[in-house]
Amino acid sequence: MADLGKKYCVNCLADVTNLRLRCTDCPDIELCPECFSAGAEIGNHRRWHGYQQVDGGRFSLWGPEAEGGWTSREEQSLLDAIEQYGFGNWEDMAAHVGASRTPQEVMEHYVTMYIHGNLGKACIPDNIPNRVTDHTCPDNAPLSPSLTTPLPPLDISLAEQQQLGYMPLRDDYEIEYDQDAEKLISGLSVNYDDEDVEIEMKRAHVDMYVRKLRERQRRKNIARDYNLVPTFLGRDKKDKEKEKPGTLGVVGAAGSVGGAGAGGGAIGSGSTTAAGSGPVPSTPKRKITKEEKEQRSRLRGLCQFMAHREFEDFFENMHKERLLRAKVRELQRYRRNGITRLDESAEYEAARHKREKRKENKSVVTSKRGSGGGLGSGMGLGGGAGGGGGVAGGLGVGGVIKEEGKDGEFAAIENLTGFELLSDREKVLCNSLNLSPARYLTVKTIIIKDHLQKRQGIPAKSRLPSYLDKVLKKRILTFLTESGWISRDAS
């Protein structure tokens, strides 16, 4: 005799006590899931009739071979719990499923069946499309997200920590940049009845606060990179006294950490070892001139946009550029003087050195005569204007006027007598030959007079000054010939 508490399929007589499908149009028609799926028809029952699921809640979704024997009701409670409490809250999910399941069982069943099982493989793809990619600026850039990463604490003593108000465990200071930044969010609260405008306003406050935090961290990074904290504490001076000459430390005055973003101290060619970081091998540094120190001080505002190594490379490249420009000016001067080989340049430099030595000796002799002769010597110098010296007579003894010509600069000769009488090409010539305008005009006058007398058949003696050597004479004759003052046969 059949058990009265059980239900059987009217088609295959299988036990359907736990789960059966009842026809809503035909009385006493209950089918098992297999017969219903096959579209079984008995008597007046047709497969398109409406149906109702009758669930006893005790069947298993994963079959009898599944571990744990989870029923359909427990599976439904588990899915409700994962939606309500979220992934990871296994204690709350176990309490929602029922007292018969522990948090460990809930976690293992969900991970095994819904993530790593067939359902998870079918629903969760290996490569998730449209994944968000961070395209912001790279690490260590001025506004990159990596600015908020914590740095190792500063390696300073307890007394120095108290002096700075530094808290090493938090890597913070008692007085930070923009100390009142937290007021933007201290009074914010999210309410369910907030309007869209209020929510956007609160988001804007949070965004402003995040920007201030990043700016605060950026200034700390600059202080670390440029070694400003030891500079402020005076450590760099002590290290300089201990070290031997050969490396130069940070040259600037102290700048507080809060003002590090603006270059709180004069940045020199200091050590690249930031406080708290590992030691960097020091290399011998070149001597920094006073002009470069002033230039570094003027451009220290760039420190907030450049790393310390980039800042140092920037000035090293500028120094190389100056050296190259000086070398180019020297080669151009050689070319103007008709020098095309290195051995000729060595001969030219030797002759130039001799000229400068003679001028120096003459200046010393003249100064001695002026101090010993008194007024009489001074009258003798002034009397040179009435002699046969022409324009050069006003100069008196050669060497009295100190020539301060520099390569490629007219400022050294523009204040000398006769500068306004020169053409642009003559200015370049005098500057390249290190010759004063008055002396050049004297030599030019003598050469042109001699040339005119030779053309008229009048014999003339060369009256060139003694300070004019062969190199200068050849260069001036070539220039006058190219300019058309004298003919080529005369030169």
Image (cartoon, rainbow, N blue to C red):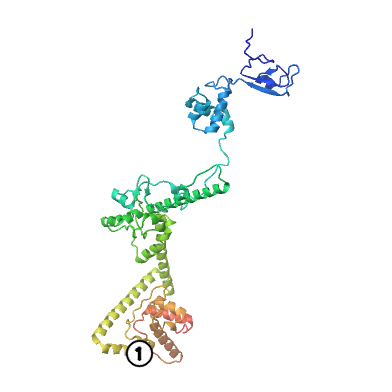
Q: Where does the image place residue 427, in percent across and percent down from the top left?
A: 43, 79
Quarter of the image containing the N terminus?
top right
Q: Mark 1: give few (<14), some (14-19) or many (20+) Cα within 10 Å.
A: some
- Residue 374 occupies which quadrant of the picture? bottom left
Farthest residue to the right: give it.
Answer: 44
Farthest residue to the front: give it.
Answer: 193
Q: Does any portion of residue 140 appear in the rendered image?
A: no
Residue ID for mark 1 = 385
Going 33% across and 76% down the picture, which residue do you hit? 356
- Residue flagged by tag 1: what amino acid is it? Ala
| Count of all numbered marks drawn on residues in the image | 1
Going 40% across and 90% down the picture, which residue do you hit? 460
Q: Does any portion of residue 447 appear in the rendered image?
A: yes
Element at label 1: helix
- Residue 367 occupies which quadrant of the picture? bottom left
Q: Where does the image place residue 459, in percent across and percent down from the top left?
A: 41, 91
In this rendering, the answer to whether 286 lies above or below 450 is: above
Q: Where does the image place residue 452, in percent across and percent down from the top left?
A: 45, 89
In this rendering, the answer to whether 292 lies above or below 444 is: above
Quarter of the image containing the C terminus?
bottom left
- Tell which of 400 and 232 is nearer to you: 232
Q: Is residue 47 left or right of residue 269?
A: right
Q: Is residue 289 left or right of residue 38?
A: left
Q: Is residue 139 left or right of residue 42?
A: left
Going 63% across and 15% down the picture, which residue do you hit? 15
Q: Where does the image place residue 488, in percent across and percent down from the top left?
A: 47, 82
- Residue 284 occupies which quadrant of the picture? bottom left
In this rendering, the answer to whether 292 lies above or below 200 is: below
Farthest residue to the left: give it.
Answer: 372
- Tell which of 329 and 175 is nearer to you: 175
- Tell which of 43 and 94 is nearer to you: 94
